[in-house]
Amino acid sequence: MIGMKPAVATHEPRHLSGETLNLLAWHIPDLVAYQHHPDEWWFAPLDDNLPIVRLNRTGLDMLKAMNGHTTVRTLLERYGSKVCGPDGQPGQWHLERWALPNYSLCYYGAEPPGGHRHKAKWDMLLQQIREGWSGRDGFEGEDHLEDFHVHDLKDNAEDDGHFDLIETTVSHLFREPNEALNGLTYGKLLMQKLRRLGWFNPKPHIIVEVGGGLGYVARELGKELLPFEKQSIKYCSVDITKPFLKLQVTRAKAGGWPCSGTQANAEWLPFKDHSVDLVIDNENMADMTPVKLTKGELLSGRGATPQHQEALDWIRRVRLPLGDDLPEDVIFNLGPFRFVAELWRVLKPGGRAFLTEFGIEEGWPAPVKLPGHTEYEVQYSHLRQAVRWLGFHEQYLPLPQFLTMKPDTKVLCTGAAYTIQRFCQAMNRPFVVRAYSENELKQTLGDLLPKFQGTHYHDVADPAWFGLIDFKVLLLEKPGGAPKPTFTENRGYRWYSQR
Protein backbone atom coordinates (compact mmCIF):
# COMPACT_ATOMS: atom_id res chain seq x y z
CA MET A 1 0.00 0.00 0.00
CA ILE A 2 0.98 3.60 -0.43
CA GLY A 3 2.62 5.75 2.19
CA MET A 4 0.32 8.75 1.79
CA LYS A 5 -2.82 7.38 3.43
CA PRO A 6 -4.84 10.06 5.17
CA ALA A 7 -5.63 9.64 8.83
CA VAL A 8 -8.93 8.05 9.73
CA ALA A 9 -11.58 10.75 10.15
CA THR A 10 -13.07 10.76 13.65
CA HIS A 11 -16.81 10.09 13.88
CA GLU A 12 -18.42 9.73 17.28
CA PRO A 13 -20.53 6.57 17.72
CA ARG A 14 -24.22 7.13 17.02
CA HIS A 15 -26.60 7.57 19.93
CA LEU A 16 -29.20 4.84 19.58
CA SER A 17 -32.03 6.78 21.13
CA GLY A 18 -34.99 9.00 20.21
CA GLU A 19 -36.01 9.10 16.55
CA THR A 20 -32.98 7.00 15.51
CA LEU A 21 -34.68 3.95 17.03
CA ASN A 22 -37.55 4.28 14.54
CA LEU A 23 -35.29 4.36 11.47
CA LEU A 24 -35.02 1.35 9.17
CA ALA A 25 -31.69 -0.38 8.59
CA TRP A 26 -30.21 -1.67 5.31
CA HIS A 27 -26.91 -3.45 4.90
CA ILE A 28 -24.78 -2.05 2.08
CA PRO A 29 -25.24 -3.70 -1.34
CA ASP A 30 -22.47 -6.00 -2.55
CA LEU A 31 -21.11 -6.38 0.98
CA VAL A 32 -18.61 -9.25 0.88
CA ALA A 33 -18.20 -11.64 3.81
CA TYR A 34 -15.32 -14.08 4.19
CA GLN A 35 -15.59 -17.08 6.53
CA HIS A 36 -12.14 -17.33 8.05
CA HIS A 37 -13.01 -19.90 10.72
CA PRO A 38 -16.15 -21.95 11.43
CA ASP A 39 -17.47 -19.18 13.72
CA GLU A 40 -15.63 -16.11 12.39
CA TRP A 41 -16.54 -13.93 9.40
CA TRP A 42 -14.60 -10.96 8.06
CA PHE A 43 -16.04 -7.71 6.70
CA ALA A 44 -14.10 -4.70 5.39
CA PRO A 45 -15.03 -1.10 6.32
CA LEU A 46 -15.20 1.36 3.45
CA ASP A 47 -12.16 3.22 4.85
CA ASP A 48 -9.23 0.84 4.42
CA ASN A 49 -7.32 2.64 7.17
CA LEU A 50 -9.64 0.82 9.60
CA PRO A 51 -8.99 -2.79 10.60
CA ILE A 52 -11.10 -5.59 9.18
CA VAL A 53 -14.27 -6.20 11.19
CA ARG A 54 -14.46 -9.73 12.62
CA LEU A 55 -17.83 -11.16 13.61
CA ASN A 56 -19.24 -14.39 14.97
CA ARG A 57 -22.47 -15.96 13.71
CA THR A 58 -24.60 -13.63 15.85
CA GLY A 59 -22.99 -10.60 14.22
CA LEU A 60 -23.54 -12.11 10.79
CA ASP A 61 -27.21 -12.68 11.60
CA MET A 62 -27.54 -9.08 12.80
CA LEU A 63 -26.08 -7.78 9.55
CA LYS A 64 -28.40 -9.98 7.49
CA ALA A 65 -31.36 -8.66 9.52
CA MET A 66 -30.67 -5.17 8.14
CA ASN A 67 -32.94 -5.78 5.18
CA GLY A 68 -34.89 -2.54 5.09
CA HIS A 69 -37.81 -4.02 7.05
CA THR A 70 -36.27 -3.93 10.52
CA THR A 71 -35.97 -0.87 12.76
CA VAL A 72 -32.94 0.10 14.77
CA ARG A 73 -35.05 -0.43 17.92
CA THR A 74 -35.81 -4.04 16.96
CA LEU A 75 -32.15 -4.75 16.16
CA LEU A 76 -31.06 -3.23 19.46
CA GLU A 77 -33.56 -5.31 21.41
CA ARG A 78 -32.68 -8.50 19.57
CA TYR A 79 -28.90 -8.21 19.33
CA GLY A 80 -27.80 -5.25 21.47
CA SER A 81 -26.60 -7.25 24.47
CA LYS A 82 -25.29 -10.26 22.57
CA VAL A 83 -21.60 -10.68 21.90
CA CYS A 84 -20.89 -10.25 18.18
CA GLY A 85 -17.13 -9.67 17.91
CA PRO A 86 -14.08 -11.76 18.89
CA ASP A 87 -12.96 -9.09 21.37
CA GLY A 88 -16.27 -9.14 23.20
CA GLN A 89 -17.93 -6.18 21.46
CA PRO A 90 -21.72 -6.45 21.93
CA GLY A 91 -24.25 -5.87 19.19
CA GLN A 92 -24.89 -2.31 20.41
CA TRP A 93 -21.21 -1.43 19.90
CA HIS A 94 -21.49 -2.45 16.23
CA LEU A 95 -24.88 -0.83 15.69
CA GLU A 96 -23.46 2.48 16.96
CA ARG A 97 -20.65 2.37 14.37
CA TRP A 98 -21.76 0.53 11.24
CA ALA A 99 -23.79 3.46 9.88
CA LEU A 100 -20.82 5.86 10.19
CA PRO A 101 -18.94 6.93 7.04
CA ASN A 102 -15.78 5.05 8.00
CA TYR A 103 -17.54 1.71 8.36
CA SER A 104 -20.49 2.08 5.97
CA LEU A 105 -21.56 -1.51 6.46
CA CYS A 106 -25.14 -0.33 6.83
CA TYR A 107 -27.45 2.66 6.49
CA TYR A 108 -30.19 4.01 8.78
CA GLY A 109 -33.02 6.02 7.29
CA ALA A 110 -36.74 6.36 6.68
CA GLU A 111 -36.29 5.80 2.92
CA PRO A 112 -34.08 3.42 0.91
CA PRO A 113 -30.58 4.84 0.23
CA GLY A 114 -30.99 5.40 -3.50
CA GLY A 115 -33.70 2.96 -4.54
CA HIS A 116 -33.03 -0.29 -6.36
CA ARG A 117 -29.87 -2.02 -5.12
CA HIS A 118 -28.23 -1.86 -8.55
CA LYS A 119 -28.56 1.93 -8.52
CA ALA A 120 -28.08 2.55 -4.80
CA LYS A 121 -25.50 5.32 -4.42
CA TRP A 122 -25.25 5.65 -0.64
CA ASP A 123 -24.59 9.29 -1.40
CA MET A 124 -24.35 10.67 2.13
CA LEU A 125 -21.95 8.02 3.40
CA LEU A 126 -19.79 7.99 0.30
CA GLN A 127 -19.52 11.78 0.12
CA GLN A 128 -18.50 12.03 3.77
CA ILE A 129 -15.85 9.35 3.50
CA ARG A 130 -14.52 10.87 0.28
CA GLU A 131 -14.19 14.26 1.95
CA GLY A 132 -12.06 12.48 4.52
CA TRP A 133 -10.02 10.75 1.81
CA SER A 134 -9.11 13.98 0.07
CA GLY A 135 -8.57 15.95 3.24
CA ARG A 136 -10.96 18.80 2.44
CA ASP A 137 -14.40 19.44 1.07
CA GLY A 138 -15.37 21.49 -1.96
CA PHE A 139 -12.94 22.74 -4.59
CA GLU A 140 -9.30 21.71 -4.28
CA GLY A 141 -6.79 24.27 -5.45
CA GLU A 142 -5.51 24.89 -8.92
CA ASP A 143 -2.07 23.47 -8.08
CA HIS A 144 -3.31 20.54 -5.99
CA LEU A 145 -3.44 17.87 -8.71
CA GLU A 146 0.09 18.62 -9.88
CA ASP A 147 1.36 18.55 -6.29
CA PHE A 148 -0.36 15.20 -5.72
CA HIS A 149 1.18 13.52 -8.77
CA VAL A 150 4.63 15.07 -8.42
CA HIS A 151 5.18 14.79 -4.67
CA ASP A 152 2.62 12.52 -2.97
CA LEU A 153 3.18 9.55 -5.31
CA LYS A 154 6.97 9.58 -5.30
CA ASP A 155 7.21 6.37 -3.19
CA ASN A 156 4.48 4.41 -4.93
CA ALA A 157 5.69 2.81 -8.13
CA GLU A 158 6.66 -0.69 -7.07
CA ASP A 159 3.30 -2.42 -7.54
CA ASP A 160 -0.28 -1.95 -8.71
CA GLY A 161 -1.50 -0.56 -5.37
CA HIS A 162 -2.12 3.02 -6.51
CA PHE A 163 -4.18 2.05 -9.56
CA ASP A 164 -5.94 -0.77 -7.71
CA LEU A 165 -7.28 1.50 -4.99
CA ILE A 166 -6.72 5.20 -5.66
CA GLU A 167 -7.06 5.91 -9.38
CA THR A 168 -8.54 2.77 -10.90
CA THR A 169 -8.73 3.23 -14.66
CA VAL A 170 -10.52 1.31 -17.40
CA SER A 171 -7.21 0.31 -18.97
CA HIS A 172 -5.99 -0.97 -15.58
CA LEU A 173 -9.11 -3.10 -15.03
CA PHE A 174 -8.62 -4.64 -18.47
CA ARG A 175 -4.83 -5.07 -18.41
CA GLU A 176 -5.31 -8.87 -18.61
CA PRO A 177 -7.23 -10.67 -21.39
CA ASN A 178 -10.95 -10.30 -20.76
CA GLU A 179 -14.14 -11.84 -22.10
CA ALA A 180 -15.74 -8.39 -22.50
CA LEU A 181 -12.94 -7.46 -24.95
CA ASN A 182 -13.19 -10.67 -27.00
CA GLY A 183 -10.39 -12.26 -24.99
CA LEU A 184 -7.98 -9.37 -25.57
CA THR A 185 -6.31 -6.87 -23.26
CA TYR A 186 -7.24 -3.17 -23.44
CA GLY A 187 -3.93 -2.31 -25.12
CA LYS A 188 -4.17 -5.01 -27.79
CA LEU A 189 -7.75 -4.09 -28.63
CA LEU A 190 -6.82 -0.40 -28.79
CA MET A 191 -4.07 -1.16 -31.29
CA GLN A 192 -6.50 -3.15 -33.43
CA LYS A 193 -8.90 -0.21 -33.45
CA LEU A 194 -6.17 2.31 -34.35
CA ARG A 195 -5.06 0.13 -37.24
CA ARG A 196 -8.62 -0.18 -38.53
CA LEU A 197 -8.87 3.60 -38.44
CA GLY A 198 -5.90 3.67 -40.81
CA TRP A 199 -3.65 5.34 -38.26
CA PHE A 200 -0.78 2.96 -39.03
CA ASN A 201 -0.96 3.42 -42.78
CA PRO A 202 1.48 5.04 -43.20
CA LYS A 203 2.87 4.09 -39.83
CA PRO A 204 3.84 6.83 -37.36
CA HIS A 205 7.50 7.38 -36.57
CA ILE A 206 7.10 9.14 -33.21
CA ILE A 207 4.43 7.90 -30.77
CA VAL A 208 3.93 9.72 -27.47
CA GLU A 209 1.93 8.19 -24.62
CA VAL A 210 0.85 10.70 -21.98
CA GLY A 211 0.43 9.51 -18.38
CA GLY A 212 0.94 5.83 -19.16
CA GLY A 213 0.40 4.62 -15.59
CA LEU A 214 2.31 1.40 -14.97
CA GLY A 215 3.08 0.74 -18.64
CA TYR A 216 0.57 -2.02 -19.36
CA VAL A 217 -0.98 -0.21 -22.34
CA ALA A 218 2.42 0.42 -23.96
CA ARG A 219 3.38 -3.23 -23.54
CA GLU A 220 0.13 -4.56 -24.98
CA LEU A 221 0.09 -2.07 -27.88
CA GLY A 222 3.52 -3.36 -28.87
CA LYS A 223 2.57 -7.02 -28.55
CA GLU A 224 -0.22 -6.55 -31.09
CA LEU A 225 2.29 -5.47 -33.77
CA LEU A 226 4.82 -7.73 -35.51
CA PRO A 227 8.51 -6.89 -34.95
CA PHE A 228 9.00 -5.47 -38.46
CA GLU A 229 5.95 -3.23 -37.99
CA LYS A 230 7.64 -1.56 -35.00
CA GLN A 231 10.83 -0.86 -36.91
CA SER A 232 11.59 2.87 -37.29
CA ILE A 233 8.97 3.76 -34.64
CA LYS A 234 10.13 5.52 -31.47
CA TYR A 235 7.86 5.29 -28.41
CA CYS A 236 8.06 8.13 -25.86
CA SER A 237 6.46 8.04 -22.41
CA VAL A 238 5.61 11.37 -20.78
CA ASP A 239 4.42 11.43 -17.16
CA ILE A 240 4.24 14.06 -14.44
CA THR A 241 4.87 11.30 -11.84
CA LYS A 242 8.54 10.40 -12.20
CA PRO A 243 8.49 6.99 -10.45
CA PHE A 244 5.95 5.64 -12.95
CA LEU A 245 8.26 6.36 -15.89
CA LYS A 246 10.67 3.53 -15.03
CA LEU A 247 7.89 0.94 -15.23
CA GLN A 248 6.47 2.53 -18.37
CA VAL A 249 9.80 2.29 -20.17
CA THR A 250 10.44 -1.26 -18.90
CA ARG A 251 7.05 -2.53 -20.01
CA ALA A 252 7.19 -0.66 -23.32
CA LYS A 253 10.49 -2.40 -24.06
CA ALA A 254 8.87 -5.73 -23.09
CA GLY A 255 6.34 -4.95 -25.83
CA GLY A 256 9.15 -4.50 -28.32
CA TRP A 257 9.22 -0.70 -28.48
CA PRO A 258 12.45 1.35 -28.50
CA CYS A 259 11.32 3.64 -25.69
CA SER A 260 12.39 6.65 -23.66
CA GLY A 261 10.71 8.37 -20.70
CA THR A 262 10.46 12.06 -19.82
CA GLN A 263 8.99 13.68 -16.72
CA ALA A 264 6.75 16.52 -17.84
CA ASN A 265 3.32 18.06 -17.43
CA ALA A 266 1.15 17.34 -20.49
CA GLU A 267 -0.15 20.91 -20.33
CA TRP A 268 3.34 21.89 -21.61
CA LEU A 269 4.63 19.01 -23.74
CA PRO A 270 8.45 18.81 -24.07
CA PHE A 271 8.47 18.40 -27.86
CA LYS A 272 9.28 20.65 -30.81
CA ASP A 273 6.57 22.03 -33.05
CA HIS A 274 5.30 19.57 -35.68
CA SER A 275 7.46 16.69 -34.38
CA VAL A 276 5.00 13.97 -33.24
CA ASP A 277 2.89 11.60 -35.35
CA LEU A 278 0.60 10.01 -32.76
CA VAL A 279 -0.39 10.82 -29.16
CA ILE A 280 -2.18 8.35 -26.88
CA ASP A 281 -3.75 9.66 -23.69
CA ASN A 282 -5.68 7.25 -21.46
CA GLU A 283 -7.60 8.85 -18.59
CA ASN A 284 -5.45 11.80 -17.61
CA MET A 285 -7.52 14.87 -18.45
CA ALA A 286 -9.52 14.74 -15.20
CA ASP A 287 -6.16 15.19 -13.43
CA MET A 288 -5.32 18.36 -15.32
CA THR A 289 -5.66 21.88 -13.92
CA PRO A 290 -9.18 22.95 -12.92
CA VAL A 291 -10.11 26.60 -12.39
CA LYS A 292 -13.00 27.83 -10.26
CA LEU A 293 -14.50 30.95 -11.83
CA THR A 294 -17.06 33.25 -10.23
CA LYS A 295 -20.18 34.50 -11.97
CA GLY A 296 -18.76 38.01 -11.79
CA GLU A 297 -15.56 36.97 -13.57
CA LEU A 298 -17.53 35.19 -16.31
CA LEU A 299 -19.80 38.18 -16.94
CA SER A 300 -17.04 40.80 -16.85
CA GLY A 301 -14.35 38.76 -18.61
CA ARG A 302 -11.80 39.91 -16.01
CA GLY A 303 -10.05 37.22 -13.96
CA ALA A 304 -8.86 37.61 -10.37
CA THR A 305 -5.59 35.75 -11.18
CA PRO A 306 -3.52 35.13 -14.32
CA GLN A 307 -4.84 31.55 -14.43
CA HIS A 308 -8.41 32.77 -14.20
CA GLN A 309 -7.76 35.29 -16.97
CA GLU A 310 -6.28 32.53 -19.13
CA ALA A 311 -9.44 30.48 -18.60
CA LEU A 312 -11.69 33.44 -19.42
CA ASP A 313 -9.68 34.15 -22.56
CA TRP A 314 -10.28 30.57 -23.72
CA ILE A 315 -14.01 30.89 -23.05
CA ARG A 316 -14.14 34.12 -25.08
CA ARG A 317 -11.86 32.82 -27.83
CA VAL A 318 -13.81 29.65 -28.58
CA ARG A 319 -17.16 31.36 -27.82
CA LEU A 320 -18.41 28.96 -25.20
CA PRO A 321 -22.06 29.58 -24.35
CA LEU A 322 -22.49 30.53 -20.70
CA GLY A 323 -26.20 29.76 -20.56
CA ASP A 324 -29.00 31.79 -19.05
CA ASP A 325 -28.97 30.38 -15.51
CA LEU A 326 -25.34 30.92 -14.54
CA PRO A 327 -24.35 29.58 -11.07
CA GLU A 328 -22.44 31.74 -8.58
CA ASP A 329 -19.28 29.83 -9.47
CA VAL A 330 -18.29 27.15 -11.99
CA ILE A 331 -15.36 24.82 -12.62
CA PHE A 332 -13.59 25.12 -15.96
CA ASN A 333 -11.22 22.51 -17.51
CA LEU A 334 -8.27 24.81 -18.13
CA GLY A 335 -5.75 21.92 -18.17
CA PRO A 336 -7.46 19.95 -20.94
CA PHE A 337 -7.76 23.13 -23.02
CA ARG A 338 -4.02 23.72 -22.62
CA PHE A 339 -3.39 20.07 -23.51
CA VAL A 340 -5.28 20.08 -26.81
CA ALA A 341 -3.56 23.37 -27.74
CA GLU A 342 -0.23 21.62 -27.11
CA LEU A 343 -1.36 18.71 -29.27
CA TRP A 344 -2.04 21.13 -32.11
CA ARG A 345 1.45 22.56 -31.67
CA VAL A 346 3.46 19.30 -31.47
CA LEU A 347 1.58 17.12 -33.98
CA LYS A 348 2.82 17.01 -37.53
CA PRO A 349 0.38 17.83 -40.33
CA GLY A 350 -1.68 14.66 -40.56
CA GLY A 351 -0.79 13.75 -36.97
CA ARG A 352 -3.40 12.17 -34.73
CA ALA A 353 -4.37 11.83 -31.08
CA PHE A 354 -6.47 9.32 -29.13
CA LEU A 355 -7.95 10.81 -25.93
CA THR A 356 -10.25 9.13 -23.43
CA GLU A 357 -11.57 10.19 -20.02
CA PHE A 358 -14.81 10.29 -18.05
CA GLY A 359 -16.91 13.38 -18.54
CA ILE A 360 -20.16 15.16 -19.26
CA GLU A 361 -21.78 16.88 -22.21
CA GLU A 362 -23.97 19.47 -20.46
CA GLY A 363 -23.48 21.89 -17.59
CA TRP A 364 -20.18 22.49 -15.82
CA PRO A 365 -17.70 19.92 -14.41
CA ALA A 366 -18.22 18.50 -10.94
CA PRO A 367 -15.60 17.18 -8.48
CA VAL A 368 -15.02 13.44 -8.06
CA LYS A 369 -13.53 12.60 -4.67
CA LEU A 370 -10.77 9.97 -4.56
CA PRO A 371 -8.42 8.98 -1.72
CA GLY A 372 -5.88 11.76 -1.29
CA HIS A 373 -7.18 14.08 -4.00
CA THR A 374 -10.08 15.20 -6.16
CA GLU A 375 -10.48 14.89 -9.92
CA TYR A 376 -12.82 16.90 -12.15
CA GLU A 377 -15.11 15.76 -14.94
CA VAL A 378 -14.20 16.75 -18.49
CA GLN A 379 -16.85 18.91 -20.16
CA TYR A 380 -16.74 17.44 -23.66
CA SER A 381 -18.99 19.89 -25.47
CA HIS A 382 -16.60 22.65 -24.32
CA LEU A 383 -13.48 20.67 -25.27
CA ARG A 384 -14.87 19.70 -28.68
CA GLN A 385 -15.57 23.34 -29.41
CA ALA A 386 -11.93 24.09 -28.56
CA VAL A 387 -10.45 21.37 -30.80
CA ARG A 388 -12.60 22.50 -33.73
CA TRP A 389 -11.52 26.11 -33.11
CA LEU A 390 -7.88 24.96 -33.16
CA GLY A 391 -8.48 23.31 -36.53
CA PHE A 392 -8.65 19.59 -35.72
CA HIS A 393 -10.92 17.12 -37.43
CA GLU A 394 -12.59 15.24 -34.60
CA GLN A 395 -14.69 12.18 -33.92
CA TYR A 396 -16.45 11.60 -30.60
CA LEU A 397 -18.12 8.48 -29.18
CA PRO A 398 -18.51 6.49 -25.93
CA LEU A 399 -15.55 4.29 -25.01
CA PRO A 400 -17.59 1.02 -24.90
CA GLN A 401 -18.81 1.73 -28.45
CA PHE A 402 -15.29 2.48 -29.67
CA LEU A 403 -13.99 -0.77 -28.17
CA THR A 404 -17.12 -2.73 -29.30
CA MET A 405 -17.32 -4.24 -25.83
CA LYS A 406 -19.75 -7.08 -25.17
CA PRO A 407 -22.21 -5.16 -22.95
CA ASP A 408 -23.77 -8.17 -21.23
CA THR A 409 -20.49 -9.73 -20.06
CA LYS A 410 -20.73 -10.31 -16.31
CA VAL A 411 -17.91 -8.83 -14.24
CA LEU A 412 -17.27 -8.74 -10.51
CA CYS A 413 -18.39 -5.62 -8.65
CA THR A 414 -15.31 -3.41 -8.20
CA GLY A 415 -16.17 -2.86 -4.53
CA ALA A 416 -16.12 -6.63 -4.05
CA ALA A 417 -12.74 -6.83 -5.78
CA TYR A 418 -11.27 -4.18 -3.42
CA THR A 419 -12.66 -6.04 -0.40
CA ILE A 420 -11.38 -9.44 -1.51
CA GLN A 421 -7.94 -7.89 -2.00
CA ARG A 422 -7.99 -6.66 1.62
CA PHE A 423 -8.90 -10.13 2.88
CA CYS A 424 -6.20 -11.77 0.73
CA GLN A 425 -3.59 -9.30 1.97
CA ALA A 426 -4.49 -10.25 5.56
CA MET A 427 -3.85 -13.89 4.60
CA ASN A 428 -0.67 -13.10 2.60
CA ARG A 429 -2.29 -14.33 -0.61
CA PRO A 430 -1.89 -12.44 -3.89
CA PHE A 431 -4.97 -10.88 -5.47
CA VAL A 432 -5.02 -8.06 -8.03
CA VAL A 433 -7.97 -5.78 -8.73
CA ARG A 434 -9.27 -6.14 -12.28
CA ALA A 435 -12.45 -6.92 -14.23
CA TYR A 436 -13.06 -10.55 -13.25
CA SER A 437 -15.59 -12.76 -14.96
CA GLU A 438 -17.04 -15.54 -12.80
CA ASN A 439 -14.70 -18.13 -14.32
CA GLU A 440 -11.66 -15.87 -13.91
CA LEU A 441 -12.45 -15.26 -10.24
CA LYS A 442 -12.88 -18.99 -9.68
CA GLN A 443 -9.47 -19.69 -11.22
CA THR A 444 -7.83 -16.94 -9.17
CA LEU A 445 -9.31 -17.77 -5.75
CA GLY A 446 -9.48 -21.55 -6.05
CA ASP A 447 -10.27 -23.12 -2.67
CA LEU A 448 -11.04 -19.69 -1.13
CA LEU A 449 -14.04 -18.96 -3.35
CA PRO A 450 -16.64 -21.03 -1.41
CA LYS A 451 -15.75 -19.06 1.73
CA PHE A 452 -16.95 -15.77 0.20
CA GLN A 453 -20.52 -14.49 0.27
CA GLY A 454 -21.84 -11.44 -1.59
CA THR A 455 -19.59 -11.59 -4.67
CA HIS A 456 -22.11 -9.88 -6.96
CA TYR A 457 -21.64 -9.56 -10.73
CA HIS A 458 -22.79 -6.73 -13.00
CA ASP A 459 -23.12 -6.44 -16.76
CA VAL A 460 -20.01 -4.60 -17.90
CA ALA A 461 -22.28 -1.88 -19.35
CA ASP A 462 -24.23 -1.46 -16.08
CA PRO A 463 -23.61 2.05 -14.63
CA ALA A 464 -23.43 0.41 -11.19
CA TRP A 465 -20.25 -1.44 -12.19
CA PHE A 466 -17.84 1.27 -13.34
CA GLY A 467 -19.94 3.77 -15.26
CA LEU A 468 -18.21 2.98 -18.55
CA ILE A 469 -20.81 4.92 -20.51
CA ASP A 470 -19.42 8.10 -18.88
CA PHE A 471 -16.03 7.47 -20.52
CA LYS A 472 -15.76 9.14 -23.92
CA VAL A 473 -13.27 8.92 -26.78
CA LEU A 474 -12.07 11.94 -28.71
CA LEU A 475 -10.20 11.14 -31.95
CA LEU A 476 -8.25 14.09 -33.35
CA GLU A 477 -6.56 14.53 -36.70
CA LYS A 478 -4.52 17.55 -37.72
CA PRO A 479 -5.17 18.44 -41.38
CA GLY A 480 -2.41 18.66 -43.95
CA GLY A 481 -1.00 15.13 -44.07
CA ALA A 482 -0.06 13.16 -47.15
CA PRO A 483 -3.01 12.25 -49.38
CA LYS A 484 -4.61 8.98 -48.37
CA PRO A 485 -4.02 6.06 -50.75
CA THR A 486 -6.83 5.69 -53.27
CA PHE A 487 -7.19 1.94 -52.84
CA THR A 488 -8.92 -0.57 -50.61
CA GLU A 489 -7.61 -3.94 -49.46
CA ASN A 490 -9.60 -7.18 -49.55
CA ARG A 491 -8.08 -10.58 -48.74
CA GLY A 492 -4.59 -9.38 -49.54
CA TYR A 493 -5.51 -7.69 -52.86
CA ARG A 494 -5.41 -3.93 -53.41
CA TRP A 495 -8.21 -2.40 -55.47
CA TYR A 496 -7.30 1.03 -56.88
CA SER A 497 -9.83 3.65 -57.80
CA GLN A 498 -9.84 5.33 -61.22
CA ARG A 499 -9.63 8.86 -59.77
Image: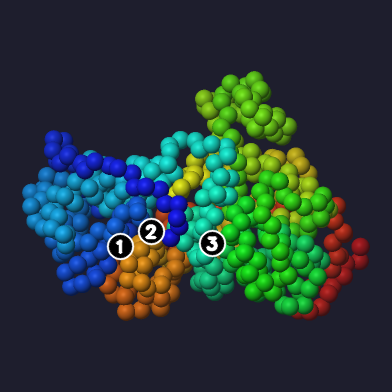
| Marks 3/1: CA–CA distance | 29 Å
Instruction: Tell me which residue sits at (21%, 72%) in the image.
Output: 37
Asked whether residue 177 is in view, the answer is yes
Nearer-the-camera pick, 322 or 93:
93
Nearer-the-camera pick, 300 or 2:
2
Give me the disc on residue 32.
1
Left or right relative to 196: residue 304 = left
Residue sitting at the far right = 499
Q: Secondary structure at mark 1?
A: loop
Q: Give residue 93's position: percent from left, percent from top.
A: 16, 50
Left or right relative to 132: residue 280 = right
Q: Give residue 409's position: percent from left, percent from top.
A: 46, 67
Q: Which residue is mark 2?
A: 415
Which amino acid, mark 3? Ala
Q: Where is 279 relative to 337, above or below?
A: below
Q: Nearer the viewer, mark 3 or mark 1?
A: 3
- Among the two numbered marks 3 and 2 on one chain, the one whose residue lies closer to the N terminus: 3
Q: Which residue is mark 3?
A: 157
